[in-house]
Amino acid sequence: MTAWCWGFGWGDDAIEPKTRSMMNLAMIGALGKMHEWEIHCRGALNNGVTKQEIRAIIHVVAIYCGVPQGLECFRAAKKVLDERGL
């Protein structure tokens, strides 16, 4: 699974890493997998996703998946951003 996800999924350069990270945050947030969301939030920051872009992604999650799920994403984002002093 790891080889497939990271080799095929991330090894395909048709989508740049920043965009792929943004897509992952939206999908993982929609699924409510908050532990994974935190991990991918850290990776997204490493791939150049800004604080403002994370906020916009969470807004989309809240609109399409419900405000409670958006709040969970905001809580997870705050934890990650606080860790980084952002």
Image: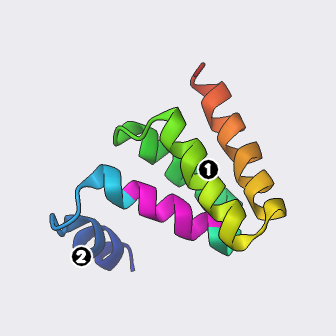
Is 50 rendered above or below residue 1? above
The residue wearing badge 2 is 8
Residue at the limit of the structure toward the right, as seen here: 68
Q: Is residue 65 visible?
A: yes
Q: Which residue is located at x 71 percent, y 72 percent?
A: 65
Q: In the figure, is residue 21 to the left or right of 13?
A: right
Disc 1 crowd rating (10 Å Cα; few below 14, some 14-19, many 20+) is many
Which residue lies at the image location 41% right of the left edge and 41% below the top edge? Answer: 49
Query: Which region shows up in magenta?
Result: 21-29
Q: Residue furthest front?
A: 63
Q: How far across and how far down the image is residue 73, in percent?
A: 70, 53
**Is 53 drawn above or below residue 8 in the view shown?**
above
Q: Residue furthest top?
A: 85
Q: Residue 37 falls in which quadrant of the image?
A: bottom right
Which residue is depicted at the point 23% across and 63% down? 15
Q: Amino acid at mark 1?
A: Glu
User: Residue 38 bears which disc, if any?
Assistant: 1
Q: Percent x, y for residue 40?
A: 51, 53
Q: Check residue 22 for magenta coloring.
A: yes
Calculate the distance from the C-alpha at mark 1 to the C-alpha at mark 2.
22 Å
